Amino acid sequence: MSEKGVSIVNRKANFEYHTELKFTAGMVLMGTEVKSIRNGNANISDAYCMMEDGELIIKNMHISEFKQASFTKHETLRNRKLLLNKQELKKIANRLKEKGTAVFPIKLYENDRGFLKLDIGVGKGKKAFDKRDDIKSKDIQRELAKIKF
C-alpha cells in the first residue's frame, strides 16, 4: 500500500527483535488522538502489545495531547485496542504461548485511504552478540558507501 502523510517508525524494533511475522492492524482511537498523530506527536518506541480477553491491546504508546482540543482530551498513555481478524489473532496468540516471544510495534502510518495503521511484528528478542553483529554489518556498509563515489 502507498503511504501518505504521517509515518512514525520504531527504530529500536529491528535492533531489539528478530521479526518472524508481520501484521497490519487498525486501531481504536479518539478524534483528538488522530489529529495529534497526524501532527507527528506520537511515540511507539517504548510500546508493546499484549493479548487480553482474546483482543490485542497496545500499551505504553504515547500520543501527546492535541493543543486545539476543547473539553474532549485523551490520556496520553492509555491502552488502545488493535483491530485484526480472528485468524491473525489466533496466530499471534499461538506464538505468544512460546517462551520468549513478543509482539511489538514497527511502524505507525496513514494509508492511502486516510486510515491510521500500525505494522506490528511477532518475534523473539535478540541476544547481545546478535546486536553486535548488526552494528558490525552496518559499519561495514557505511565504510563501503564512503569508498564508492
Image (cartoon, rainbow, N blue to C red):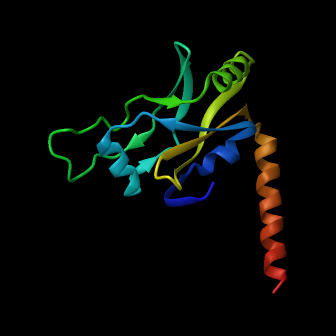
Q: Position of residue 5 (x, y in %)?
A: 47, 61
Taking 136 as reference, is 80 left or right? left
Farthest residue, direction front: 113
Q: Is residue 3 above or below residue 54?
A: below
Count all numbered tags in the image, as a single digit: 0
Where residue 19 sits in the image (x, y, percent)?
Answer: 74, 39
**Residue placed at 28% from the left, 37% from the top?**
74
The residue under the point 37% across, 31% down is: 78
User: Residue 118 appears at what percent x and percent y?
Assistant: 55, 42
112 versus 96 height, above or below: below
Where residue 60 sits, quadrant-wise, is: top left
Vertical order, 123 against 16 (above or below): above
Quadrant in the picture for the C terminus: bottom right
Q: Quadrant of the N terminus?
A: bottom right
In the image, taking residue 104 as reference, residue 75 lies left or right, namely left
x then y, percent, for residue 27: 47, 36
